[in-house]
Image (spheres, helix red, strand yellow):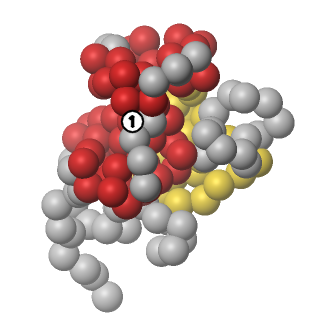
Amino acid sequence: MKFQRPSILTYQETIRFHGHNGPFLALGYKLGKYIDKKHKLKGIMDIIIKVKVKPKKPFTCIIDGLQCSTFATLGKGNMMVEKSRGKDISVFVVAGKRKYTYHITGKAMDICLGAEDLHKAARKIFRTPFSQLFNLSLP
């Protein structure tokens, strides 16, 4: 069965879904919007995402940002989470026959982990160029 794809959630709706604003949520949302635009996703199952992340808050907040901006969800099974040993976060994406891996940069981690004010840090994530937050590698 194919489902029609609704509009992705706005960032304000994403904050409401998640419960609060923060830089890891913003990071996931920003990456998801980039992925959505890059791959011109049309259906709710057009993408598979595997997030390799430390299974601890605040790191896991990136998952909610990605879910709200890509339609890949844990419940539908087109998003998976794998435990990472350190603080590094990698996001593996399969869109059709294309495969990509996005690695969160040291600069992004510094913004997220050095946040004294979660709202300001989230705004900083949105103001920082994509290339300074994520490194792309191909398999």
Quarter occupied by residue 104: top right
Secondary structure category for the residue under label 1: helix
Residue 80 position (above or below residue 61): below
Query: In x, y percent, where is residue 63?
Result: 52, 50
Packing grade of label 1 (10 A; few <14, some 14-19, many >=20) is many
Residue found at x 83% / y 36%: 85
Residue 97 visible? no
Residue found at x 73% / y 41%: 54
Residue flagged by tag 1: what amino acid is it? Ala
Answer with left or right where residue 18 lies relative to residue 87.
left
Quadrant in the picture for the C terminus: top right
Query: In x, y percent, where is residue 71?
Result: 35, 61
Quadrant in the picture for the N terminus: bottom left
Residue found at x 20% / y 69%: 5
Q: Nearer the viewer, residue 84 or 18?
A: 18
Q: Nearer the viewer, residue 127 or 80?
A: 127
How many numbered marks appear?
1
User: Residue lying farthest front?
Assistant: 117
User: Residue lying farthest bottom?
Assistant: 1
User: Residue lying farthest right?
Assistant: 85
Residue 1 position (above or below residue 89): below
* Residue for badge 1: 26
Residue 110 visible? yes
Query: In x, y percent, where is residue 3?
Result: 25, 80
Query: In x, y percent, where is residue 131?
Result: 39, 15
